[in-house]
Amino acid sequence: MNGMEWLLEIALVVLLAATLFHALRLERALGVLKRDRAALEALISGFNDSTRLAEAGIERLREMSDGAGRQIARHLESGQELREDLRYLIERGEKLADRLDRGTRSGRMAGAETASGPMVFAPQPEAGEAPRARSQAERDLMKALRMVR
């Protein structure tokens, strides 16, 4: 063997050692990658489970909000009906109060000529209306009707 062959064999041994060194490093990196891949798969699986649970929760929330919306709509409809009923009752009460007022005024005018009971006058008559006497009961009734409005 001459010197040249020795040199080639030494170079070949050095290249084989470098290749062996890089192969070991690559094997370790692949081992880490396999472990990380398993951890990544577990993480993805957990994320998918969480996503499914969140979707189910959103669907339940949507159903509950739809039910609550329908219930609120029913309450609003009921409230509208009650409002209309109250408006009707208030109108009827005002008409009855006006009739009662006219009846007591005409009765009082007729009774004022014969009776000498105490008369209380309203503070300010409306335009074109003469001052009129009101009893305490009439004032209480008018006050109650105004409070209903």
Image (cartoon, rainbow, N blue to C red):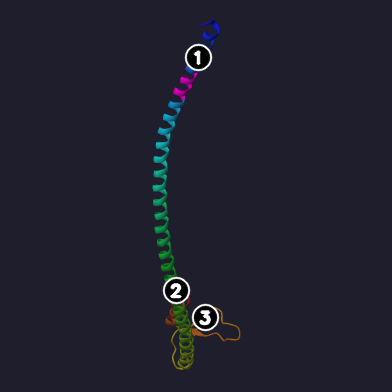
Q: Residues within 10 Å of mark 2 (few under 14, many from 20)?
A: few
Instruction: Relative to 32, say whether 131 is above or below.
Output: below
Tell me the amino acid under the disc marked 2.
Glu
Range of residues picked out in magenta: 17-25
> Marks 3 and 1, Cα distance to the nearest angstrom?
124 Å
Tell me the amino acid under the disc marked 1.
Val
- The residue shown at (42%, 54%) is 55
Instruction: Relative to 43, say whether 3 is above or below.
Output: above
For mark 3, what is the residue? 122
Tell me where residue 66 sits by quadrant: bottom left
Tell me the amino acid under the disc marked 3.
Ala
Tell me where residue 148 sits by quadrant: bottom left
Q: Residues within 10 Å of mark 1 (few under 14, many from 20)?
A: few
Query: What label sits on residue 14 in the rendered view?
Result: 1
- The residue shown at (41%, 47%) is 48
Of pointers 3 and 1, the one earlier in the residue sequence: 1
Image x and y of residue 97, in percent:
46, 84
> Marks 1 and 2, Cα distance to the nearest angstrom?
92 Å
Query: Which is more foreground, mark 3 or mark 1?
Result: 1
Query: What label sits on residue 77 in the rendered view?
Result: 2
> Which residue is at the far top?
2
